[in-house]
Amino acid sequence: MLRNDKTHRASAPRFQQIVDRLRDEIVGGRLPQHSALPSERAVADQHGVSRMTARRALEAVEAEGLAYTAERKGRFVSPPRLNYPVSSMANFLTDAEENGVDLEVEVIAARACSADAAMARVLCVAEGEALSEVTRLFLNGGHATFLETEYVIAERSDQLLKAHDATSKPLAEQRFSPFGHDADIVIRMRPLSAAEAELLGLSANQAGIEAE
Amino acid sequence: MLRNDKTHRASAPRFQQIVDRLRDEIVGGRLPQHSALPSERAVADQHGVSRMTARRALEAVEAEGLAYTAERKGRFVSPPRLNYPVSSMANFLTDAEENGVDLEVEVIAARACSADAAMARVLCVAEGEALSEVTRLFLNGGHATFLETEYVIAERSDQLLKAHDATSKPLAEQRFSPFGHDADIVIRMRPLSAAEAELLGLSANQAGIEAE
DNA sequence: AAGAATATCTGGTCTATACCAGAAAAATCT
DNA sequence: AGATTTTTCTGGTATAGACCAGATATTCTT
């Protein structure tokens, strides 16, 4: 039993096959949301593998976001993902301005970063191009209405910034304090592809940076 | 050797102690970026644990973003994180408008989501409040200048949207095509805390949703 | 010196087993 | 019936081995 199956080399690892099975059962709807997945031991028995292998399969399913673990209770099916109805929303701010809507903007956080592959493609710049990430809070009639994070091409942002620069910052700081944030800034991650990870010296699915 | 150390119960798991050691060496600068971490077998020997335990420690270090793996070559120290100089940037768009800067806005993607703990705090709404996530591309003089993702409180966004709605969408669709995106939309993730994960039925560190 | 064969690294996968502690259900005792 | 114990689940941690295949360094040939 110590010998591995040599008949089909270069095939997918065993645990991956189990992952596929489990995924099918979940996305196929045979397992309703929040229902229990088979336990590690059950999977091991069912598929004739060791518990560690079963565990890895279940962990992989988890890593896909299809399940979650409740310690010492079991693993359960995650609720399905939301849909993303394509909204017709656009240029809020320009229109708001034009229509005289009461709108204020506050900078919550800003940091420098560089363009990853996806962004580079969208923004039509080279990968690694210097970007500025800015998170801002918008207030409509004094109420927080939306939060945005934007990635600005550092080079081009200068010309846009020159015009106002001076006044906005101290104002922003005052305005934000009532929200008692200070320590919490929105952290955002993007999963890196294997290629990007290698390139950047990061591990796959790891986020570039965290703000504090 | 099969018996575990019973002298100090409830202590941190062994692999965690190794993680701490490795982390120290990396953040302490004793291991320069892109230098090789000890191999799984080396760690196992050095710390007197089995290879699987050593492996788990190294994987944990990776999960923290401190290292990356090159298959069958080794594990290496990730480059340090960027700094986030607090910029004085603010309300780009309002100022741009006022100063007559040529600025166009395009909706790249939009989806519905709900407020997580951090966002709820910042936006002053209940956790789970319906939000709309919109990703837009801004063009300055015909050149892509920045990309933003914003989270709008669904309820309040309506009033802002009513004003323009009609014209923006078809325009956005045309404008965007030259970028050949279609299949690539910026994917964004936020790591869930253990508490949030349990609440939402997701696994920790998993992102809420992916757009395709 | 240049090229081919070999030995030795590496991480990736896997087995079979063990003990732990929290959670939950079942059995037991009031 | 209600409270308490016990048993049986669960995942979490850990061991000590094993084989695989890609990457690399070494050595041996030509």
Image (spheres, coloured by chain):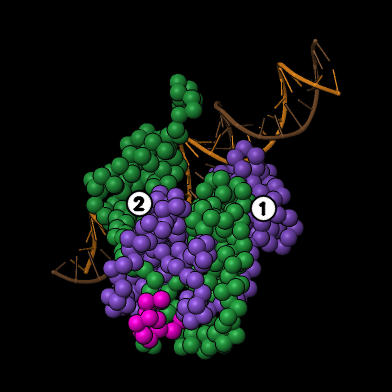
Chain colours: A green, B purple, C orange, D brown
Question: Residue B51, percent across and down?
Answer: 60, 42
Do discs 2 and 1 belong to a common subunit?
A: no
Callout 1 crowding tier (Cα within 10 Å): few <14, some 14–19, many ≥20:
many
> Is A54 a magenta residue?
no
B98 w.r.t. B39: above or below: below
Q: Which residue corresponds to mark 2?
A: A66
Which three-letter amino acid code belongs to the residue tagged 2? Leu
Question: Residue B76, percent across and down?
Answer: 66, 49
Locate residue A55: give its quadrant: top left
Cα–Cα span, label 2 and label 1: 31 Å
Question: Residue A83, percent across and down?
Answer: 29, 58
A112 w.r.t. A193: above or below: below
The residue located at (42%, 38%) in the rendering is: A15
Q: Chain of mark 2?
A: A
Using the image as rendered, state which of residue A68 and residue B43 is in the foreground: A68
B38 w.r.t. A145: above or below: above
D22 w.r.t. C4: above or below: below
Q: Which residue corresponds to mark 1?
A: B77
Q: Which residues are magenta?
A: A93-107
For the residues bearing labels 2 and 1, Cβ distance under 8 angstroms: no
In what element is the residue under mark 1?
strand
Locate residue B201: give its quadrant: bottom left
Question: Residue A4, percent across and down?
Answer: 48, 26
Callout 2 crowding tier (Cα within 10 Å): few <14, some 14–19, many ≥20:
many
